[in-house]
């Protein structure tokens, strides 16, 4: 069988995390590992060994297998860096829980992010997008480059999450700064841990305020209906709030920034989208697939022996199910490194798969669709203000840019 032949072909040791070569494409190591069998041992930053799957089918099977625990406090869980490890345990939101407790906590916030609730936010998101684009137009009126990241890509998701939680929009930049210091894989562990502690203190204070002055925004409702009703402890509530902030800020911001570079690299695709807004839905799915920004999140630890193809992965092993590998599997996506906004990319796993599939995906899609259609329409001559080779990309839990100077 192909799998037998393939696993014999594993020729080198893979070191995780991988480094992208083309900043807009997954690291080539994924393609190599997939071609040589698909299930591969990898060496982690701390020299321990974990396993990596690279085929779309294997990754989906792993992510729906209840023997794959998302609990990062179980020994063997494959953290992506020393600082990620240093801050694990603090703020363990339900993204890192299993079974009934995961489901119970997820349900506490699922309605606020459901399709009908998010649809109600459309006029708000459209207004914010137009305001931010107005501000961008003013800033660049004299022809000087504008940093798309800080002027548009970061503010939009942060304003949207603040709106959902019931926080003033002015809290966004401070929260974003904490998230960035926490999640940067290159920052020293102490910096990460300090940012995590700062976030805890901030959220704790927020909850205390809502206890004193009840409100009917999402934080207020979680306090009255869940915390005070005894359904969740204070630390659990802080974990949920933290998860919405961490999950909602960086991911969408970097999709907006990288997606802009991607469209500018493919003027034919940008022209098609500009001419036909009806393509927005499929264009966004293709951008999510192609860029696969959440390249470190889908990690698990096996609580039982697990067989994938001809490999038995022993209980206690760390397992990586990287989203970029699945999303560029040529068996599912023909010519996967080709960016084609008309392809049917719906089977991508950019939002994960199984019980942990992204709870914010409706919101993310709304923001991305409104943002890209209006950006292209408003700035027909949009261009990078520096050669693409001069853009600095960042090494973080979520892939992205450090800045994105644009002009029009
Ligand atoms: C989970 C990606 C936007 C909140 C996930 C997972 C992925 C992901 C891959 C699964 C992680 C795993 O299985 O370990 C993305 C991408 C986004 C995005 C690419 C933007 C384009 C958002 C937004 C929010 C959010 C806007 C908040 C409103 C969450 C939450 C989970 C999650 C709460 C955990 C779900 C669970 O464990 O049941 N996301 N996300 N995400 N995301 Fe997102």
Image: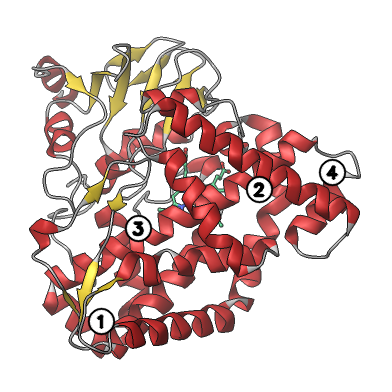
Q: Which residue is mark 2?
A: 241
Out of 27 and 128, give the one closest to the viewer. Answer: 128
Q: Is residue 115 depicted above or below 55 in this figure? A: below
Out of 223 and 277, give the one closest to the viewer. Answer: 223
Queried on whether the Cβ of the residue with tag 3 lies below 8 angstroms from ligand 1, the answer reads no
Asked whether residue 344 appears in the rendered view, the answer is no
**Secondary element at image label 1:** helix
Residues under labels 2 and 1: Cα distance?
35 Å
Quadrant in which the C terminus appears:
bottom left
Say few, some or many: other residues with alpha carbon within 10 Å of mark 4 (under 14 / 14 to 19 / 20 or more): some
**Secondary element at image label 3:** helix
Q: Which residue is mark 4?
A: 227
**Residue 95 on image: x %, y %:** 56, 38
Q: Left or right: where does residue 224 sit relative to residue 272?
A: right
Residues under labels 1 and 3: Cα distance?
20 Å
First along the sequence among labels 1 and 3: 3
**Residue 48 on image: x %, y %:** 32, 11
Q: Is residue 194 depicted above or below 163 in this figure? A: above
Q: Which residue is mark 1?
A: 273
Say few, some or many: other residues with alpha carbon within 10 Å of mark 1 (under 14 / 14 to 19 / 20 or more): many
Q: Left or right: where does residue 292 sit relative to residue 407?
A: right
């Amino acid at each position: 069988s192909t799998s037998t032949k393939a696993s014999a072909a594993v020729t080198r040791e893979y070191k995780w995390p991988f480094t992208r070569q083309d900043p807009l494409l997954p690291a080539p190591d994924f393609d190599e590992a997939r071609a040589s069998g698909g299930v591969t041992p990898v060496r982690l930053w701390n020299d321990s060994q974990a396993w990596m799957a690279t085929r779309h089918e294997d990754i989906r099977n792993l992510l729906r297998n209840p023997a794959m625990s998302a609990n990062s406090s179980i020994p063997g869980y494959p953290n992506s860096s020393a600082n990620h490890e240093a801050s694990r345990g603090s703020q363990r939101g339900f993204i890192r829980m299993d079974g009934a407790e995961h489901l119970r906590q997820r349900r506490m916030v699922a309605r606020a992010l459901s399709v009908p609730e998010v649809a109600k936010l459309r006029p708000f998101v459209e207004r914010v997008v137009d305001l931010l684009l107005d501000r961008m137009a003013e800033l660049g009126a004299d022809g000087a480059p504008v940093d798309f990241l800080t002027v548009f890509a970061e503010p939009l998701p942060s304003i949207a999450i603040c709106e959902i939680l019931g926080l003033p929009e002015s809290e966004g930049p401070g929260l974003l700064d904490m998230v960035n210091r926490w999640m940067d894989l290159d920052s020293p562990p102490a910096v990460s841990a300090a940012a995590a502690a700062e976030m805890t203190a901030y959220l704790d204070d927020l909850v205390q305020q809502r206890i004193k002055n009840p409100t009917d925004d999402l934080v207020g409702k979680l306090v009255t209906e869940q915390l005070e009703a005894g359904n969740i402890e204070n630390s659990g509530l802080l974990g949920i709030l933290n998860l919405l902030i961490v999950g909602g800020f960086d991911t969408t911001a970097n999709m907006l920034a990288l997606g802009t570079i991607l469209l500018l690299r493919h003027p034919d695709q940008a022209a098609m989208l500009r001419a036909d807004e009806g393509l927005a839905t499929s264009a966004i799915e293709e951008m999510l697939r192609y860029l696969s920004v959440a390249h470190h999140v889908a990690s698990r630890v096996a609580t039982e022996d697990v067989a994938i193809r001809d490999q038995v992965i022993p209980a206690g092993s760390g397992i990586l199910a990287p989203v970029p590998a699945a999303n560029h599997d040529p068996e599912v996506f023909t010519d996967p490194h080709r960016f084609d906004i008309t392809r049917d990319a719906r089977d991508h796993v950019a939002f994960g798969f199984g019980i942990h599939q992204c709870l914010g995906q409706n919101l993310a899609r709304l923001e991305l669709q409104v943002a890209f259609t209006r950006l292209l329409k408003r700035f027909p001559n949009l261009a990078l203000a520096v050669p693409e080779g001069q853009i600095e990309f960042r090494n973080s839990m979520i892939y992205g840019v450090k800045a994105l100077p644009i002009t029009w």
